[in-house]
Amino acid sequence: MTIAVDFQPVGRNISVEAGVTVLEASRAAGVGLSAVCGGETGCGSCRVRLSSDAAVSPPNSMERDILSVEELAQGLRLACQTRIRGSLRVDIPPESLTAPQRTQVEGEELPFELDPPVTAHTVQLKEATQTDQRSDWERLSDALVTAGKVKPRGYPLGMVRQLPGILRENDWQVQMGLRGEEIVSVSAPDSPLLGLAIDIGTTKIAGYLVDLKSGQTLAMQGIMNPQIGHGEDIMARIAFVMKQPAGDRQLQKAVVDALNQLALDLCRQASMGNGNHADAGGVTPLQIAEVVVVGNTAMHHLFLGLPVRQLGMAPYIAAASAAMDVKANEIGLSVSDGAVVHLLPLIAGFVGGDHVSMLLATDISSDTGNCIYLDIGTNTEVTLTTGGRTLSCSTASGPAFEGAHIKDGMRAAEGAIERVRIVNNRIVVQTINDEKPVGICGSGILDAIAQFKLAGVMNPRGAFEAGHPLVREGERGLEVVLVAGVETKHGRDIVLTRKDVSEIQLAKGAIRAGIELLLLEAGLSADRLEQVIIAGAFGSFIDVNSAIAIGMFPLLPRCCFRQVGNAAGIGAKMALLSLSKRGEAQEIARKNEYLELSNHGEFTNEFTRAMRF
Amino acid sequence: MTIAVDFQPVGRNISVEAGVTVLEASRAAGVGLSAVCGGETGCGSCRVRLSSDAAVSPPNSMERDILSVEELAQGLRLACQTRIRGSLRVDIPPESLTAPQRTQVEGEELPFELDPPVTAHTVQLKEATQTDQRSDWERLSDALVTAGKVKPRGYPLGMVRQLPGILRENDWQVQMGLRGEEIVSVSAPDSPLLGLAIDIGTTKIAGYLVDLKSGQTLAMQGIMNPQIGHGEDIMARIAFVMKQPAGDRQLQKAVVDALNQLALDLCRQASMGNGNHADAGGVTPLQIAEVVVVGNTAMHHLFLGLPVRQLGMAPYIAAASAAMDVKANEIGLSVSDGAVVHLLPLIAGFVGGDHVSMLLATDISSDTGNCIYLDIGTNTEVTLTTGGRTLSCSTASGPAFEGAHIKDGMRAAEGAIERVRIVNNRIVVQTINDEKPVGICGSGILDAIAQFKLAGVMNPRGAFEAGHPLVREGERGLEVVLVAGVETKHGRDIVLTRKDVSEIQLAKGAIRAGIELLLLEAGLSADRLEQVIIAGAFGSFIDVNSAIAIGMFPLLPRCCFRQVGNAAGIGAKMALLSLSKRGEAQEIARKNEYLELSNHGEFTNEFTRAMRF
């Protein structure tokens, strides 16, 4: 007898024999489920949430040991210990997913009402004759007025160009995409009407193709931001633009080219999903009638071709910050000629539309009590809500979590150590895609340092304990070998040095200081926090317990933390499908009180305190 | 003692000795004044209008013979007979001008109130600081609201891109071009704010650069339409687009490239005129904040990249016909990034915005009684006003007046015979620029045929009289030698054949039929006409008496005819400088009753009648 298992949110189905573990089933399904110890030692990294208790074996002693009573009550189980007995759905929390989900597009989605900016309308026109010589556009315009719709505003050249052909090929019928009083697409009756939501991160770009008529997501995909070749972080890219003649146009073209390719890939993917090949009735980017783009202030400016020089120096002023509608063809996007790109508003030079989008997706507008919202990256945006106020700041957490400035650091790519546990004084690691270790990425470093602290490998200032069996004398001082050369891909030891620990100290110190300064500003202590919401790829993959252990997050019950995945992308998708959500985003940006930390009197004190482990 | 003479509308000044003739003065000044007989025989082609009777010799017997009492009373004189005695202004009527004024940009200008769509406003912003981190664009927006102006609508990317640099280089001051609620240009305080008016003809393009602040015309220039390489007339170009893949884009690029070059030339000319070199404080196309374009329906469509296929077949439907505002950068014009191109409305497939513009420039909106308005070209547009009604039609007059299909025909270029007189049974000609004859252009052919009729060289059906001394037997039948080979540039005789006469018969028959059919539709006879207004290059250079003589125009007193030069271009300039004139143009198009001749029951009858000489 075979049993159906449905893995979410990756959306994979598989049939298995009764008695296999959830971990075995996930491997058979090709789902990247984290399992550092492979079920050997109970590292706890393979937590999953099950739809039904009845369909699986009851919790065994290892599970009861590692999972709390509350976690078990919520349906959380260890995949390596749980045997399947009947059909069930397995929800993999973000922190239990490994790559290739690392160019993350998934995220928690809250329900909302469909209220898209562009709606489809089909009209039948009277054929032109010798005695009725009205032009095609005026004929359409008149028909809309007759049909009780508004008279279309303006003359969108792209539409006027296409109309004569469409009318004469479809017996004088045409489907329009109406955006208020504007016609933003014309096409044959019953053509798809698509929308594209984009989250431009400094490192990664996430894209979502949706059906504007049904609100359904047709395809999603993550890609690297090609601007990376011209600078790994924001400041490096601003420097590039200031140094290089036409550097801004170069960076703009790079990202726009990538988006055009992404749109094409998404359409291909959606056409395959529907059983249609792109060339046989599938969808094409020219059917995209609306685009929403979110990004941090620098990505927003570089995408639009706005100058960034003034973003690189105090007082870090944006060229424009409000929500914007611009024509897609003015930017070079190869979508419907009349399509509009909507950009969510920015809050400040270092708190961008992606953070607004994340706040939108996590429903900041409803009363969430005392809550911290975090977008962890090279710059970490922090928002605090309390008593009707919303405060935000940006803190320079640096690129250490991206693996930069770490001796054996790397991005979250194949072969990166992403989980670390110390079990019986032995270091156990898990790599992305279970490849031979190549280096260590952010979540792995975080784990390692937390484990060092718990195992007494280092003291609260971050210095290694010379006598500890895991510590050795390296070329440049004390270090810890994570994986010996015999087991790595390149044959060299993978180590963490004192300097690596310092980098993480600076990073986590900056994040914690940001949190504390917002709390200070609001006159609140950390233990009054009811929730901490963590967004973004890195934030979703980290082990929250490790982050608490090293003092990056305040000490709060585990259930207070919510890892929501790519909330910025999900917010962009909401704004694509709902005008009222766009209004909400503008309200979020408007209400926000921005706290500039660079000249804040308490910053140094808080930062110093936050650096301790 | 030297005397100052001012030639208008060409705008040239010269000092002469007392006693020289106006014709001699014009030659010294390099002004192309028509003078077929050179003062020998009194051909009457050198009519000019003088500002003062007192400054010249009184009319002699030849002048009293050739000019009517009314003409003399209006200040008209023969330039070859009139001797200068004191300072004066000489107005050269269009029909007395020769090339290089033939790529005509001048025309009669009626006064109107300056009411430009774009106005300049300068604001001083507060500098951005750590505690006032509003973005540049929001800062500008707020300042406009504070200054009692409207909040600017939308986010014109080009302007948002330029603002940060301008603000920081000009102590946070900026001059804006405001177009209603839109900002269409940002620049340093006190920068020029320019406008560009363009008349795109099938053969020629006329451009005018104006100062939007003062209304002054800074420069004007005529160029050839480069699309000519892809078809001499409209139908040939439509055929090219239908045959050639991407032919429409090719034609669009050709005209847009030419306009960009024209804008550059006009700016250079204006900078020189102000004593500034373009690179030292002169004006540049990027200061052009508004453009007006007029053209026939096909030129309008090709300029905008609209499809023309359906213009080439009945019922000849335009893609769009109303007045349009489109972004200059969407079309590829290299002007201010926010500049708008306004297109005057079209009336029908073959009555375009250039005709509306001509009607605007000639003040059709004021009550002009029974009046015919003519734009003579390959297609001739005819409008009749009577008793509050306005009727228009288009008639296929063909390319004979451009010299096409005429054995020795040519365009109005250097060496073309432009005036013909028969004096004492001898044919006298005048060529453009007084070069050795090369061929004959439209106005010359018209003259020749009129002279043939008056001298009895041919009968009313257009057949040559075999016995007439000017008629000889040619290779393909009877013909008349205009200039013998010994006097021509190429050494061959320049002749007019019976077939040439037939071509002109068709052309003038079509024009006259159009006039008569409109009169018929209005229930009016030709003798009730009070005025005939003739626009366009060809219409301005023809001898009206010749046109009457061959029956192209109805027999009316000479004073009923008004040759207004490039009225379409002048109308475009008016629309550039006045919003109320734009409203007037729309009203002209709206009120117009279009008469389609191709299926008109009386067309064949009228056409046959109109072919007789």
Image: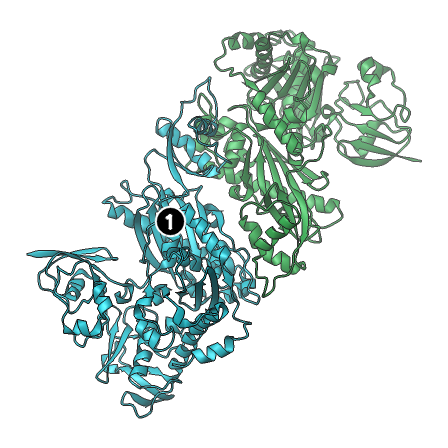
Chain colours: A green, B cyan
- Residue A577 drawn at (x, y percent): 67, 36
Instruction: Please state if B516 lies on the left or on the right of B71 as rendered.
Output: right
Q: Check the image and name the residue furthest to the bottom.
A: B467
| Identity of the residue drawn at 25% across and 48% down | B272
Q: Is residue A18 above or below residue A522?
A: below
**Closer to the camera in the image, B570 or B173:** B570
Residue B288, located in which quarter of the rendered image? top left
**Closer to the camera in the image, A98 or B392:** B392
Is residue B346 visible in this depiction of the protein?
A: no
Instruction: Please state if A471 lies on the left or on the right of A5 as rendered.
Output: left
Image quadrant occupied by the N terminus of chain A: top right
Instruction: Please state if B153 lies on the left or on the right of A174 as rendered.
Output: left
Q: Is residue B251 above or below residue A286?
A: below
Image quadrant occupied by the C terminus of chain A: top right
Q: How many numbered marks have been drawn onto this rendered protein structure? A: 1
**Closer to the camera in the image, A522 or A272:** A522
- Residue B524 drawn at (x, y percent): 45, 70
Please give the residue where the numbered disc 1 appears in the rendered image: B196
Is residue A277 visible in this depiction of the protein?
A: yes
Chain where mark 1 sits: B
Query: Is the residue marked by circle 1 packed among few (<14), some (14-19), or many (20+) residues within 10 Å?
Result: many
- Residue B334 drawn at (x, y percent): 41, 47
Q: What secondary structure is found at the residue carrying circle 1?
A: strand
Residue A382, located in which quarter of the rendered image? top right
**Closer to the camera in the image, B604 or B389:** B389
Q: Is residue B448 above or below residue A438?
A: below
User: Of the residues shown, which amino acid type is indicated by label 1?
Assistant: Leu
- Residue B547 drawn at (x, y percent): 34, 74
| Identity of the residue drawn at 69% across and 47% down | A192
Q: Is residue B574 above or below residue A345?
A: below
Q: Check the image and name the residue furthest to the left.
A: B1
Q: Check the image and name the residue furthest to the right.
A: A1
